[in-house]
Image (cartoon, helix red, strand yellow):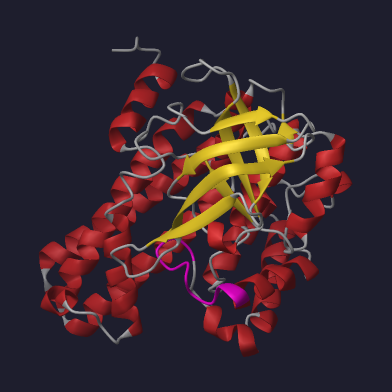
Amino acid sequence: MSMNEQEFRQEVADWMATHLVGRFACLKHRGGPGDEEAFPALRKEWEQELAAGGWVGLGWPKAHGGRDLPLALQLAFHEEYVRAGGPGRIGHIGETLMAPTLIALGTPEQQRRFLPGIREGREYWAQGYSEPGAGSDLAAITTRCWPGEDGRWRLQGQKVWTSLAHESEWIFVVARSTPGSVGREGLSFLLVPLDQPGIEIHPIRQMTGEAEFNSVFFDGAVTEADCIVGKPGEGWKVAMALLGFERGVSTLGQQMHFIHELQLVIDVARANGAARDPAIRQRIADAWVGLQGLRYNGLRMLEEDTGSTKVRPEALIYKYAWSNWHRELGQLAMDVIGVAGDVRSDDDAVRRLQQVFFFSRADTIYAGTNEIQLNIIAERGLGMPRG
């Protein structure tokens, strides 16, 4: 580690120690998948606190209000942020998905319109990809869009499993703009304001008891003519570029969160005596080893970062690997808790592990099932023919 990185890490740690206190202290290790209903209003204020501290858009070019930091320092920030207990980022989708896509493929007008709101924590984004009945086939899109006589785009259809749509001002939507087209052809990528008469957002209650996902219905919803990214009919290219950013440096922050969850498992195992069981100790050790594998693959994904919008081959195995690892961690957590896990616990640490277990049941299903991920690895990574 260079002196520059050491100093930067200390700067992040010092800032977190002096800002994640007072009214923000309750946010430590809260939020994120499976816990998104924790303090949403306060977490938005935290986003603005981060922005005021200069901790949003670290990798963005300076011309767009970022700090243009090298990859090593961006990674250092994510690691120190999670180590300090930084809450799940409610602005994650805007900062790490929408913004890089606009910087790479948006028009100068779109960049000027949307990037400041993301950077300053004033506007939040949801992702309109999945549809009911489509399963993991992202290209099986039936939501339609078309230009009206006034030049504005209209939308009709439904998106589902839309994280944090009820907390967002905007949604990016992949919709079918060419009548009669199928699969990846004839799609467009639209930026759509959520607060309008043609949109209804219905929460989906999960078995964790929370409702961080939603169904979003479009019934003649509109967006302006200049709110299309890329050319009409080329939305698939934009959608895939965005998914490439999804597997970027922020993924390593996710792994630091996993470390925190694994430590919770260890703490509970020590407290209730489960750690005396050799089989439990072995599974904890296996989990730690697996997490190191995820970390080093993540670093391999990010090395030689050139800002390309193409997904590196190493990224193809990432979702398959982490989702299986996290699902196993959830099972390990419940086995460590034992029969006490059968009822809702008032112990914060145990309750958090119960949430990990319930949410991790979906890990190998959402964002592409295991079966879809294996097809992607075979076809795009290994060059095997489609079956």
**299 or 253: nearer the viewer:** 253
The residue that appears at 73% across and 65% down in the rendered structure is 7
Q: Is residue 225 visible?
A: yes
The residue that appears at 29% across and 87% down in the rendered structure is 346
Please identify the residue farthest to the top as the structure is shown. Answer: 385
Indicate left or right for 3 with 327 as reference: right
The residue that appears at 53% across and 54% down in the rendered structure is 200
**214 or 115: nearer the viewer:** 214
Image quadrant where one finds the N terminus: bottom right
Which x, y percent locates residue 359? 32, 60
Q: Quadrant of residue 111?
A: top right
**367 or 249: nearer the viewer:** 367
Say above or below: 91 vs 64.
Answer: below
Indicate left or right for 171 with 365 as reference: right
Please identify the residue farthest to the bottom as the structure is shown. Answer: 22
Image quadrant where one finds the C terminus: top left
Q: Main secondary structure of the magenta part?
A: loop
Q: Is residue 326 magenta?
A: no
Q: Which residues are magenta?
A: 32-41
Which x, y percent locates residue 376? 39, 25
The number of callouts visible is 0
Q: Is residue 244 visible?
A: no
Indicate left or right for 150 with 271 as reference: right
Indicate left or right for 128 with 196 as reference: left
Say above or below: 387 vs 361.
Answer: above
Q: Quadrant of residue 128?
A: top right
Which x, y percent locates residue 227? 75, 38
The residue that appears at 55% across and 18% down in the rendered structure is 179
Which x, y percent locates residue 153? 70, 34
